[in-house]
Image (cartoon, grey):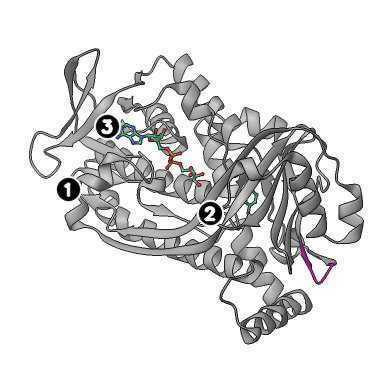
């Protein structure tokens, strides 16, 4: 079996890359360890920058986000029991973000791939990138008791944080990491969002909280929790009570509660692997970097990697030019580090840290006050939130 680009991983990165290459007439095959239902079952952030929405349209999969996405012109910050709006649209000269669930986006990409008749091999075990430094790159995997081989020109490692691609080049990678001393307990519920036109980020003495949404009838809420907490310890009632306590009285009084349809605890981590290219093997998305979810940059960074990688491959196959491939890692990392900085900063600003001294707490409060009182500081937040220019 032979293809031009072998893609490892059918998450948003791998699926979007496959779709953009297909549109450009470049043959590709995706190898995925899990089943498609398993991939669709993962609930993650769903805030898209304009660059990401444009890329989905370019890939021919923009219909879902265009019809069911909710455009947000502002975000809100709650601290000291008071809510402050940041007019992201006004401060950035008209830019917005769009709320659209990653599950829905992944489903759109899977549907498009199926209608295009492209090969996706699910439940592929022991996937292994081969000879990416040599002249015969390929990927092997096992299925139904047999070993299979896919020969290719390039391998795209879109296999997430725990994938095989980065593990294969572990001795050639520099890793930068920061782990935070708390997690997020997230609840998905079929109730109307308390704030349908803005995401609300809350800082209270009980910890961080976040009010988000997936649609006008589906909400996503989070509260900061200790890392050793368990989902079993959080009944729906306890979750709603805790969320209300962390918001301002007006919002707290308006929250619509209902049974949770998903509840999970996620740790928070910042991570970058450098470089992102190893001969004919390229890392993209969570395989190369992780951001804490504060600011919702994970999916958007993955989309930018894929934008750069697809154009590099297109340039190579169409014009025989290696320049996009050669600059891929450096181009991505410049943007990644800025998003890493922003996500770390917003996380630090909005959470309670167990070791925060009285001084650290006072500085956090002063920074929040400055942020909402200064147009310059609000603008810096807004322009990072909507996504820095490419
Ligand atoms: N072989 C084949 N597939 C693998 C392997 C492997 N050894 N290891 C992992 N995978 C698959 C996973 O099962 C998963 O479906 O690779 C896929 C990686 O998908 P994601 O983890 O969603 O990563 P990515 O596509 O880069 O998406 C980035 O996800 O975590 C969020 O915030 C992040 O929204 C961003 C997006
Ligand atoms: C979400 O909707 O899941 C979400 C929104 C904004 C964030 C993080 C997560 O910053």
Task: Answer with left or right where residue 374 lies relative to residue 21.
Answer: right
Q: Is residue 187 above or below residue 249?
A: above
Image region (quadrant) for ligand 1: top left
Is residue 293 at least partly visible in the picture?
yes
At horizontal 68% and vertical 76% (from top left) the residue drawn is 377
- Give above or below for 321 relative to 139: below
Task: Name above or below for residue 287 compared with residue 127.
Answer: below
Q: Position of residue 34 (x, y in %)?
A: 39, 26
Q: Name the residue furthest bottom.
A: 359
Q: Position of residue 329 (x, y in %)?
A: 31, 56
Residue 233 lies within the magenta run: no
Residue located beneath label 1 in the image: 279
Disc 3 to disc 1, how far (Cα)? 14 Å
Neighbours of disc 2 within 10 Å: few (<14), some (14-19), many (20+): few
What separation in Å lies between label 3 and label 2 (alpha carbons)?
A: 41 Å
Residue occupying the point 83% across, 46% down:
194
Q: In this orientation, does residue 4 appear?
A: no
Query: Pointer 3: what residue?
Result: 5
Q: Quadrant of residue 151?
A: top left
Q: Residues within 10 Å of mark 3 (few under 14, many from 20)?
A: many
> What secondary structure is marked by label 3?
strand
Which region shows up in magenta? 77-81
Q: Residue at x 18, y 15 (%)?
A: 146
List the residue tagged with mark 2: 228
Contact between labelled residues 1 and 3, with CB atoms less than 8 Å apart: no
Quick check: 203 above or below 14? Answer: below
| In this rendering, position of residue 10 left or right of residue 344 | left
Q: Main secondary structure of the magenta part?
A: strand
Q: CA distance from mark 2 to mark 1?
A: 41 Å
């Amino acid at each position: 079996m032979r293809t031009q680009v072998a893609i490892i991983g059918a998450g948003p990165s791998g699926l979007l890359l496959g779709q953009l290459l297909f549109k450009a007439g470049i043959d590709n095959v995706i190898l995925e360890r899990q089943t498609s239902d398993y991939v669709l079952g993962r609930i993650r952030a769903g805030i898209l920058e304009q660059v990401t929405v444009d890329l989905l349209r370019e890939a021919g999969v923009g219909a879902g986000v265009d019809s069911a996405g909710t455009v947000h012109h502002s975000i809100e910050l709650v601290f000291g029991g008071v809510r402050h709006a940041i007019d992201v649209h006004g401060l950035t000269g008209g830019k917005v973000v769009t709320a659209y669930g990653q599950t829905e986006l992944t489903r759109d990409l899977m549907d498009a791939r199926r209608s295009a008749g492209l090969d996706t091999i699910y439940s592929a075990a022991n996937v292994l990138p081969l000879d990416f430094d040599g002249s015969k790159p390929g990927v092997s995997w096992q299925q139904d008791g047999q070993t299979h081989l896919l020969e290719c020109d390039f391998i795209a490692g879109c296999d997430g944080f725990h994938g095989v691609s980065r593990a294969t080049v572990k001795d050639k990678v520099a890793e930068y990491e920061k782990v935070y001393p708390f997690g997020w307990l997230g609840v998905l519920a079929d109730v109307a969002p308390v704030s349908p036109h803005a995401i609300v980020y809350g800082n209270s003495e009980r910890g961080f909280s976040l009010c988000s949404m997936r649609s006008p009838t589906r909400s996503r809420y989070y509260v900061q929790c200790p890392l050793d907490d368990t989902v079993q310890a959080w009944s729906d009632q306890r979750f709603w009570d805790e969320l209300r306590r962390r918001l301002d009285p007006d919002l707290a009084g308006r929250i619509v509660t209902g049974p949770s349809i998903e509840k999970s605890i996620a740790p928070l981590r910042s991570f970058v692997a450098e470089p992102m290219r190893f001969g004919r093997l390229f890392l993209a998305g969570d395989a190369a970097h992780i951001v804490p979810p504060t600011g919702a940059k994970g999916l958007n960074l993955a989309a930018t990697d894929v934008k750069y990688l697809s154009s590099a491959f297109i340039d190579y196959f169409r014009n025989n030019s290696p320049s996009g491939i050669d600059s891929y890692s450096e181009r991505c990392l410049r943007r990644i580090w800025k998003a890493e900085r922003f996500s770390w900063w917003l996380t630090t600003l909005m959470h309670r840290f167990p070791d925060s001294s009285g001084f650290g707490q006072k500085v956090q409060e002063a920074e929040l006050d400055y942020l909402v009182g200064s147009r310059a500081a609000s603008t810096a937040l807004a322009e990072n939130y909507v996504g820095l220019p490419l």
